[in-house]
Each structure stands twice: as C-alpha cells, then as structure tokens.
Amino acid sequence: MNQSTSNADFLVAALYRFAGFSRFSELREPLAAFCEEKGIKGTLLLAHEGINGTVAGADAAIHALVDWLNAVPELSGIEVKYSRAELMPFYRMKVRLKKEIVTMGVEDIDPSKDVGTYVEARDWNALLADPDTVVIDTRNDYEVAIGTFKNALNPDTETFREFPDWAKARKEDFEGKKLAMFCTGGIRCEKATAFMHRLGLKEVYHLKGGILKYLEDVPQEESLWQGECFVFDERVSLKHGLETGEATLCRACRHPLMPEEKLSALFVEGISCPHCHDERSEEDRRRFAERQKQVELAEKAGKAHIGS
C-alpha cells in the first residue's frame, strides 16, 4: 500500500473489506474505544459482509488501527487507500452497525465469493481504449458532477440503491461488451460487478483501489480522468497526486461546488446554490441564514461549529 509523502498534518485512510463477518456487532465497542484512545476521527461501518469507512488521525494512530483491523481474522487483508489532509477532515468518530457496508438493497450479493476482474490503475487506460468497453461510473450524480472518466456512463442515481434497476434496464445493451466499472475507493464498483454477474453478464471489470488509486498512480499527462474526485469528508474533493481539490460544499444541500458555480447569483454562502435554490422555501433560507450566522460567530471565536 502506497502512502502520500506530503507534509500535511493528518493521514486519511479509506478502507474496506468484504468478508463473512457474523460476529461484526462484537467489534463495535472495542473498535470505537481504540479509535477514541488514538484520537482518530471519521466513520466506520460494520455489517455481516465486512467493514467500510474513512478515518483520519496521526500517522502512527492510523497505522496502528490498520494493524488492529488486520489482526481480526475475518478482516485480514483489508483494502486501504491513504491520502493527506492539512486539517482534521472529520468532526467526530462514529462506529455504526449496518445491514450492508455499502447499501445496494439486493439480497444475497456477496462480493467475497463472486466479483468482477480487478484491473490495476496502470492497466485501466488500456481497457478504456478498447472499443468494446463500456465505462460505467457507479457513483451518485452529485459525485459525478465534479469529475469522471472520459466517456463514462452516468447512471444519474441519487443513491446506490437505484443502481440495480438502472443496470437491469440496460442488460441487453451490455451483453457482449466489456464492462469497466469504477467508484471512489473500490467498494461500490466491487459490489456492482457482483450484481452484474447476477444478471448473467460475464466480462465485468473494476478499477482496483478506485479513482483514488488511479489519481495516485497514473501521471496527470497520461490520465483519462476529467475533473476532481468527490470524497466524503471536509476536503470535499481530491485531484491528481491526491492533493486537495478546489471543490467546496453548499452547506444548505451538501452538493459539491466548483469555483465557477460560486460566482452564480444563486449562490449565497451557507444558504443556497445553483443546485438547491429553486427547491428551497423562504423559510428554509431564513433558517439556513441563522445557522450560517452561528457558524461565522463560532469561527470568529476560534471554535468549530458542528453545523458547518
């Protein structure tokens, strides 16, 4: 596992592991206690199918956590992508028990037993150059909005639960094609390839380590990636070399915004943006304005406001 060599203060680890894990609930308390002791913040999800999440902390603390998780027999060999953050990108630590570690809502999908063919980041461009390849972005619409691979299909989903219906409706179009599927860190596309196998589609591939691994390993001059990669923490997006990107969040609707979108007359910090302005009432905007006022007062006092 490679690690960024930036001098930023916090090490961020996006990790997951699909595995049969019937005793997952037993891990919640000791895992939460370990993270609390080490000053780690972020979110980890535990389910019968494994673990998923992103956390940040001091280098030694994050490496100790990965070692701790790898010592759990069911989770040994956990997939980890490292990046850096100048500021702590999470407000608190949460360890949650879930039905699925990435929610698709389809019974009996088991990526630990049936999954597509992994493609290393360095081999991804060659797969995409094949005219028989259909490139599929398995992420949601707000993520795709700020960046994706050239010529990738966008399922226009608001949640991953919508992906199975989208795929089933296009099964005939996909037959006889190579399906190249990708997501942020590898977990959603891994589960999506298992579902494609369920549909009877055979030539299914997915980007090992996801977009994050591609942006880390593939030089920008050779890259087929366009834009920035949305991440679920306060950095908002990453670009080549896993450097923090230019995207920010609309604090009213949580949609990522590129700098040019903040020039819109519909953008008001903490209150509205081009994506949500027409969907909000004046009452909503008054409420958001009061929240933004509290955020700004907290910043002036040198405190972090949880609503920010």
Image (spheres, rainbow, N blue to C red):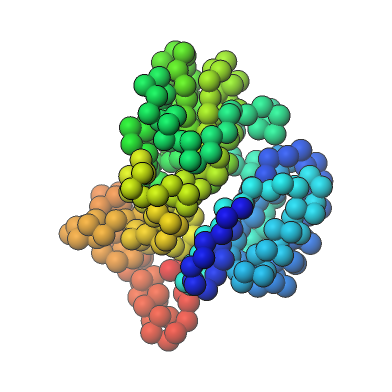
In the displayed structure image, the side of residue 120 where residue 34 appears, left or right: right
Residue shown at the point (41%, 35%) measured from the top left: 125
Regarding residue 104, the answer to whether it shows in the image is no
* Residue 22 x %, y %: 80, 41
In the displayed structure image, the side of residue 1 where residue 151 appears, left or right: left
Residue shown at the point (39%, 70%) measured from the top left: 291
Numbered disc total: 0
In the image, residue 215 sits, relative to residue 105, either above or below, namely below
* Residue 67 x %, y %: 74, 59
In the image, residue 101 sits, relative to residue 195, either above or below, namely below
In the figure, residue 28 lies in which quadrant? Answer: bottom right
Along the viewing direction, whichever of 246 and 297 lies nearer the viewer: 246
* Residue 205 x %, y %: 53, 29
* Residue 86 x %, y %: 47, 71
In the image, residue 306 sits, relative to residue 48, either above or below, namely below
In the displayed structure image, the side of residue 116 where residue 29 appears, left or right: right
In the figure, residue 268 lies in which quadrant? Answer: bottom left
Residue shown at the point (29%, 56%) measured from the top left: 258
| Quarter of the image that includes the C terminus | bottom left
**Residue pushed farthest bottom?**
301
In the displayed structure image, the side of residue 263 where residue 60 appears, left or right: right
Along the viewing direction, whichever of 167 and 285 lies nearer the viewer: 167
**Residue pushed farthest left?**
265
Residue shown at the point (47%, 46%) measured from the top left: 214
Regarding residue 231, the answer to whether it shows in the image is yes
